Amino acid sequence: MIPRKEVVMAILALTSIIIILFEYFAAPTINLLIMLMLIDIVIVAVLSVDLVSRARTSGSIRKYIVRSWYELIALTPLAVFYFLETQTIIGALLGA
């Protein structure tokens, strides 16, 4: 049986992906976008606490982070990508 905590973390990660895809394909209004960003920030915070918890219990935080570096990238909130898209040079590179 899969632990409940793992199921919750998987659902949160999937929800975060759905939010990103919705923002990309649906072009939400500014109010909806702000709400989605706030929800995403809460999800990222919960997933960050889980990552730190797993890193501490692994025995070596540094080795865990090096081994799981991709999780740090996945913890980037939607708001950061939106901010980068609105910057002229970075937005041009991301939009290309």
Image: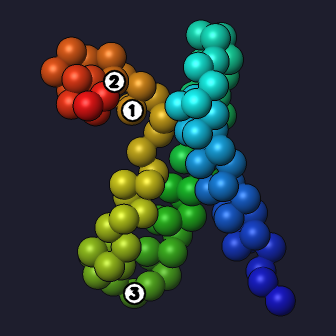
Q: Nearer the viewer, residue 37 or 5?
A: 37
Q: Which of marks 3 and 1 is in front?
A: 1
What residue is at 32 percent from the left and 67 percent from the top?
A: 69
Secondary structure category for the residue under label 1: helix
Mark 3 neighbour density, 10 Å: few (under 14) some (14–19) many (20 or more): few
Vertical position of residue 57 compared to residue 7: above or below: below
Q: Nearer the viewer, residue 44 or 32?
A: 32
What residue is at 47 percent from the left and 39 percent from the top?
A: 77
Secondary structure category for the residue under label 3: loop
User: Mark 3 to mark 1: distance in Å?
Assistant: 33 Å
Q: How many discs mark residues in the rendered view?
A: 3
Secondary structure category for the residue under label 2: helix
As shown in the figure, which amino acid type bears the numbered disc 1?
A: Phe
Report which quarter residue 96 is drawn in: top left
Residue under label 1, please give it: 81
- Residue 45 at least partly seen: no
Residue under label 2, please give it: 85
- The disc at residue 59 is 3
User: Mark 3 to mark 2: distance in Å?
Assistant: 38 Å
Going from N to C along the chain, the mark reached first, 3 or 2, is: 3
Outermost residue toward the front?
96
- Residue 54 spot, x, y in % from top left: 51, 75
As shown in the figure, which amino acid type bears the numbered disc 2?
A: Glu
